[in-house]
Amino acid sequence: MYKTVIGLEVHCELKSNSKNFSSARNGFSDIPNSHVSVVDLGMPGILPVVNKEAVRNSIKMALAMNCTIPDYLTFERKNYFYPDLPKGYQITQFKHPIGEDGYVMINVNGEEKKILIHDTHLEEDTASMDHYNDYSLLDYNRCGVPLLETVTEPCINSADEAVAFLETLRNIFLYTDTSYARSDKGQIRCDVNVSLMKDGDTHLGTRTEMKNINSFSGVREAIISEVARQTEVLNNGGVVVQETRRYDETTKTTYSMRSKEDAIDYRYFTDPNLPPIKIDSEWVSEIKEEIPKLPQDRFSTYVNDYIINEKDAYTIVRDKSISDFYEECITLLNNPVIISNWLCGDVMKYLNKESLDIIDSKLTPNMLTDLIKFIDDGKINGKQGKTVLEKMMESGKEVKEIVEELGISQISDESEIRNIILTIISNNMNLVEDYKNGKRVFDYFIGQIMKETRGRANPVITSRILKEELDKYL
Amino acid sequence: MNITELREKLDKGLVNSESLFNESVSLAKESQKEYNPFVTIMDKYECSKSDGILSGIPYVLKDNVSTNGILTTASSNILSNYVPVYDATIYKKLKDAGAVLIGKTVLDELAMGGTGTTGHTGIVKNPWNKERQIGGSSAGSAAAVALGIVPFAIGSDTGDSVRKPAAYGGIVGFKPTYGRISRYGLFAFASSLDHLGIFARNVRDVAIVTDTVKGHDSHDMTSLPDDDKMYADTLNKSVKGKKLFYIKEALDNNSEDPELGNILDNFKEVINKCESLGMKVHAESISRDLLQALYPSYMAISCAEATSNDSNLNGIHFGVRGEGNNPNEIITDARTKGFSELIKRRFIIGSYILQKENQEKLFLNAYRVRRMIVDKINELFKEYDAIIMPAASGIAPKFSDKSDKLSDKYLILDNHMVIGNFGGYPSITIPSGFVDNMPVGINITGRVCEDDLVLNIANEIEGALKYKDQIARELK
């Protein structure tokens, strides 16, 4: 048997107004080559200027991954020729990356695991290319977009762990508001290194690398397929060759791209146009303050302090907007379990059905807690609550308004109920006689009251007052 | 006429700037046939309104400075059709100051080289003697000023590419402290060594132009904060008591070479003048091994940076496009046809030096030599205000001359000015007389950010020497 050893290199585009080293906009556009400056195109004589916002977001991520931040940042050039790289080199970090020696806690099937981060560094994205039969199209909108590359140690041991790490990492990006991290837009992409080692072995086996996989399911499949391939090679007495392989999403297999011998020497050296940048420790503390409570911490608060079940806690923290919504609800109504039940139940059901994010829905924390209070106060019952919630999410109207529209608010006002009861009793004096004689007419009276109030009379209050009034005749 | 004289005539209405333009352009066209200083001569007069001191004054730019809408070739075939879409900061500042562009001048291809013979439009000849080089790489700019076509010109200086041709052309060439003038828009050769520089026929003009083009630029992270000084205002301060040194080893002469003897004699005369101005001049010793390592280290660093900097020249996004069936073939074809053999040689050296297995031995050792010489000079600058040296080991070479690149004369005396680029020091060459009817010059290099003092010393020596405002054609 073999132990699987995986290391990941995750590239994620950062949020910022302008690009990493130019003043062109950092934004997605359907119009190709509309966010491009002379700097992005590597025109002769251009110089890069580091984007402070991108550095800030990188530091934020590095801190969120428990990395050490260096006193000085340097930028290095990675040299290679390709049309998607107009300068002929990519500005990246090699010597003094923005974060080193960190870790991220992940949760795989209920088990906690610490994933070690070798480093995280700031670089620039390349242009996107579309290849056709006899030509290719280049779009430089992406060229120069700030990109944070996070490199793990080879400490991941299964496809499940790899995907759990990626999901956690994406969540940290979303929680720190540093990236949209959408894999469908290619904003988060992954290189996967896989090797196998014999049980009991102490040194790592030969690894292969699969580059640029842009979905988490792709990562999972690529790992499974590559582990199977390497297992077969080893079982047949062969050796795994160190090489770069490409994962083909359609066939779900990997094939060889280039061997180690053909590996490119990127001739890294420090970019002389970018002097070392001093990272002020006060600035780092200031950035640290801005990091919100991260999903792992929220999870433990929910489970340990709010006493909600792990499944629901996980559902809530998986989406920062849901988690923020949940926490705001708790500030309005101190009943975490009931709120969680509603949120993970009917609210999520509706959102899934409509494919909505909670921030795009019409529901607010105020509306949800109002609904819960209405039920607690006995103004409507639980079953009615579900109907009201759906109407609220459709229309964005307040609970009170919907309850009125539906005419379903419970009558809990004692004097109002008493008046109705007195009228019904006075109209049915013959039945009062039957009551006195011990006949079972109580339920008939209840029926009459419910008919009169169209079922809105609070049943508990109603039977108590009815009994009081009827007993007066005894 | 120099800038001060032209300014006075313009202000008095004795000339107007358009007629100055026309005069310069016709001189340029006339000189072009014989000396070939220009890649482009402007045909349309353009001048922004300004009341600055350079308003209406004609000048030229080296053809590696980005000019929106005007062909900029870096004297390379690969850029022979390249018209930039943006202005270099220095060009923008000169335009805003009302200076009038006359043309773009020939350089050694991509600013690599010191002969003025490798540009794609042909060799540039020395205005004092057509059989001789003007030197490079800022060959056309030096020639245009020496010929009296314009009172000042912009060049670039990575090893000595402004200061050496200035010496061979009998004019003044100055490169300020690294970062004093923004490099934004200067086609990069070796970014850590590249400086923009100024040619003129006297120190005051150089100071006036520097005052106009210097300053912090948000486009250039290596540009310095403003120093809020006007260098032209402090040129005449007394230099009495200032201490200069020359490198003893560089001036050792055991040869029978009469030209070198004359150069050293000329230098001794300059030293005497310095002393008569009340300055003290001493010989200081620097290890010969370190001095001999300057040129190879310069080559290692500059070729390494150049091979990366010039990787944008692939014919895909701009420049002359190559042919082929895939991107690699297209890029290879464009670069094969677009560069001369000398350039390819430098790129190969640069790539070799940057290779993983060679970096430590070649690239990083070159950086160590750079650090060592800079530390040594900084140590000496604690005692001295500036270095004074002959700008070259001889007069401008003939086109047919061959130099022994392993001799001390070449390695040390002809290449010591690279110290100015290694340390980013302000450094100026001024004419100091004639040897064999050809002009020679001396170089003064001072402490970082003391551009004003370097110009002040140069101005005082210039005053004592009487070789200012020389125009080559006057000798004919």
Image: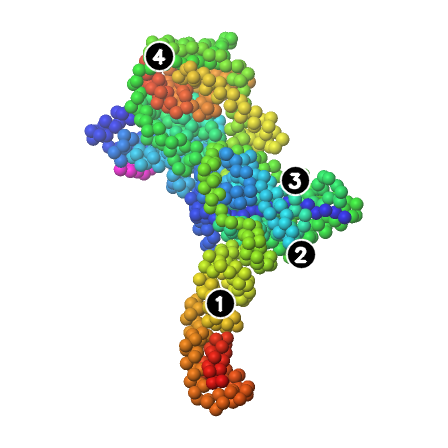
Q: Where is residue A260 in the image (x, y as percent from the top left)?
A: 67, 40
The residues bearing labels 1 and 2 have C-alpha atoms spaced at a distance of 56 Å
- Residue placed under numbered mark 2 in the picture: A251
Q: Residue B241 carries which label?
A: 4
- Residue placed under numbered mark 3 in the picture: A262
Label 4 marks a residue whose chain is B
Q: Give the range drawn in magenta.
A: B43-49
Question: Height in image: B145 above or below A424?
Answer: above
Q: Do labels 4 and 3 share a chain?
A: no
Q: Which of marks 1 and 4 is in front?
A: 1
Kind of residue at badge 3: Asp
Of residue B327 and residue A197, the one placed in the foreground of this image is A197
Q: Where is residue B271 in the image (x, y as percent from the top left)?
A: 39, 11
Question: Height in image: B376 above or below B324?
Answer: above
Q: Do labels 4 and 2 share a chain?
A: no
- Residue placed under numbered mark 1 in the picture: A376
